[in-house]
Image (cartoon, rainbow, N blue to C red):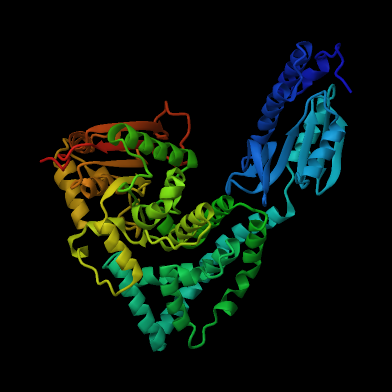
Amino acid sequence: MTISKKMTLSRTYKTFPKVVQDYYRAIQILHENQQLHEGAVAPHFAVVLRHYLAQIPQLALIEQYAIKRDGRKPLRADGALVDKQTNVLLYGIWEAKDSQDNLAQEIKKKLHEGYPTDNILFQNPEHIILYQQGEVVFDAPIATQPENLIAGLGLFLNYKPPIYERWQEAVEAFKGKVGELGGALVQIILKELKVNQVFKRAFEEFSHLCQTSLNPNLAQSAVIEMLVQHLLTERLFRTIFHHSDFVNKNVIAKEIEQVIAALTSRSFSRHEFLKSLDRFYVAIEETASTIHTYSHKQDFLNAVYENFFQGFAVKVADTHGIVYTPQPIVDFMVNSVQEVLKQEFNQNLSNEGVHVLDPFTGTGNFILRVMQEVDSLDLERKYRQELHCNEIMLLPYYIASLNIEHAYYERMKLYQPFEGICLVDTFELAEPKQGEFDFSVAENIKRVNQQKQAPIFVIIGNPPYNVGQQNENDNNKNRKYKHIDDLVADYYAKHSSATNKNSLSDAYVKAFAWATERLQDREQGIIAFVTNNGFLEGIATDGMRKQLSEVFDKIYIFDLGGNSRKSDDDLGNVFGIRVGVSITILVKTRIKCKFSN
């Protein structure tokens, strides 16, 4: 089958969308120039594919998509349709061929290699063949019949795997149900605190641990919320990651399980209570079973986690900014730190003594990316001694622990608990009353003390972005930290010419103040943050800009824009939020570099 040399765009083509007309014109030109090889024709088909895909906002096209296979080299598809929310759920595969290929033979070869047939589209400039659920559902010529091209694409793009439909339904239902169940669990816990002395003692001991690590004024309700989070999500950690003994190895999960055991000692049954969630868990677990690589499971669990907070702890999500850093941003920041280490200090992330701290780790992406940069010969030392991170919320702390430990296992083929992660409020570490911890309270406290003594060289991460409550009656107020707030007042606000300095109470501003003080006793150091970009031009932050310029020797700022209030900023936002974003790299190369009076 070949394209006729006389093929031209007749008037009938004018009735089709411009993108289709452009495709056929491009193919005709390529034909006239005898350039119908796959590399020449596939990009033009991709343009048509993206055009129609834009009408399905939940899907994205990833070209040159790697299909992972256990123990074998990955297959490489020309394109894949993936779910934007999880970035991993696979909705379809596209394979492009050229006119010289025998399409039937090429399809047979691909299927023999193991390409999935749930929803796979094969095409060349002359023909289109679509498999769904292992069967051919569309087989038609397209060389001079654009209607077949459009029809085949419609079937391909609108296909929904049954298991993913159950996932989407489950997530939506889970969001609604988890709030209701969470509230019921809170009532059970409050009741047991009154009548169950074993549980009450265990709860008080755990509360003391949390108050020591997180916040000395931590309310009872916050501790109860941690127990609820654990009860409602622990099964997902076990089943999605096949990590059945996670609660026995993670120091915080182990502490919480002791409290749960006391809670269930009288009459409460965890299994019976959560039975009504079985259908949601099963749908989520079945969908997770289609994901074979660990990194993709991480992305999937992140999506489950975000939906959990939307259903159960909306205020918590808003206060702490449940927004994950896009991987390209993480990659750029880690690569930038590597380059600065090389240029300014003749060092790299593998070198002994280069301690790295992510003070707001979320699910651990920055530490994971740093580990990729570390040479295998140095990774054991780095992992055991020189990588540090903090997380204030229980669920991301769990996920970060799993992610970092598994990344080490994949590199070293040896399981080693990651002792560099702390369940702790980073800003609270700066408070003078946190100077002494009782080492006997828990392993987590020991880790916090070790981190406080560590000679941190690099501080990298994504500080909380939330500004605070929308009104004074809202319970969603950001916490006050006397020492950090005093730093902001004495060094940023004091040197500001503004009258209204409310924006200096933003959490990311506090993060810059905290990190600056954390490095002030070192001769050398680097801070790399991705934050709100309001401090670059804001009147209230002129004192902050002055301090940063005086304290640090070199400053690199990459303004990514994204402020929805600026009419000239129409490129969108890398986080999908309304405030602008920037990446800031602060470099300290001399012993002077303390806050300036």
596 sits left or right of 311 in the view: left
Visible in this render: residue 533?
no
Q: Position of residue 380 (x, y in %)?
A: 42, 54
The spot of residue 537 in percent (x, y) is: 28, 32
Q: Is residue 256 left or right of residue 156?
A: left
The residue nearer to you, when weighing 88 against 231, is: 88
Q: Is residue 115 left or right of residue 233?
A: right
In the rendered view, tell whether residue 341 sits above or below residue 427: above
The residue most toward the right is 1
Quarter residue 239 falls in: bottom right
Q: Which quadrant is the C terminus positioned in?
A: top left
Residue located 53% across and 66% down the image = 233
Residue 138 at x, y percent in the picture: 85, 38
Q: How many marks?
A: 0
Q: Is residue 50 above or below residue 301?
A: above
In the picture, the quarter occupied by the N terminus is top right
Query: Which residue is at 47% across, 29% downward?
Result: 570
